[in-house]
Amino acid sequence: TRGSDRAAENPCRQAGAALLVGSHDFASFRGAGSAVKTNQRTLERIDVFGASGAEIRIGFEGDGFLRHMVRNLVGTLLEIGLGRRAPAWVSEVLAARDRAAAGPTAPACGLTLEFVRYAETAESAATPAP
């Protein structure tokens, strides 16, 4: 259950994740080869479950994601969870707007897109489902 997962969580990793929630310039977490107009994104929530040394599940909900952004966020949160960096480091990484300032890119294996939610428009709300 979620409650028992939360009991074993790493409080430093949770604190680092909390600093990422909100609207920020996520340039430090953007992968090379990205041709976006803006690095500004909003993370509405980050859920972290699991203890260090065991499987860790991290869920992100936001208004959009940059190339490799989630993998780079995960790598940064793992650095904090392993005690290599303090949670406040997240603020420094965001301010740097430099990919080299963040943690390593987490491997793609194990990364799962569970769902995509689009904002409902007046037109889509008026259209009956097939």
Image (tube, rainbow, N blue to C red):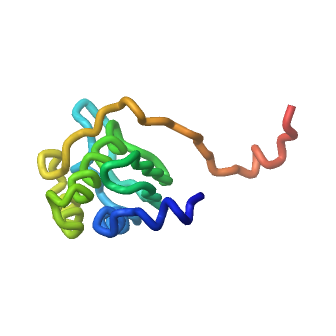
Tell me residue 21's x, y (percent): 40, 64
Task: Give the camera-side residue of 51 and 75.
Answer: 51
The quarter of the displayed image where residue 85 is located: bottom left
Identified at 13% across, 52% down, the residue is 101
Picture mark count:
0
Is 12 or 117 nearer to us in this picture? 12
Q: Is residue 35 above or below residue 86?
A: above
Instruction: Tell me where residue 38 appears, x and y as whole percent.
Output: 33, 48
Q: Is residue 36 visible?
A: no
Q: Is residue 105 left or right of residue 101?
A: right
Q: Position of residue 73 (x, y in %)?
A: 31, 49
- In depth, the one of 71 and 40 nearer the eye is 71
Residue drawn 24% across and 39% down?
A: 105
Is residue 84 in sight in this rendering? Answer: yes
Left-right relation of 33 to 66: left
- Location of the C terminus by quadrant is top right
Q: Horizontal placement of 26 versus 126: left or right?
A: left
Q: Position of residue 25 (x, y in %)?
A: 29, 57
Residue shown at the point (48%, 36%) measured from the top left: 112
The residue depicted at 43 percent of the width and 51 percent of the height is 58
Where's the N terminus, which quadrant? bottom right
- Indicate left or right for 41 with 125 as reference: left
| Residue placed most toward the observer, 95 or 18 | 18
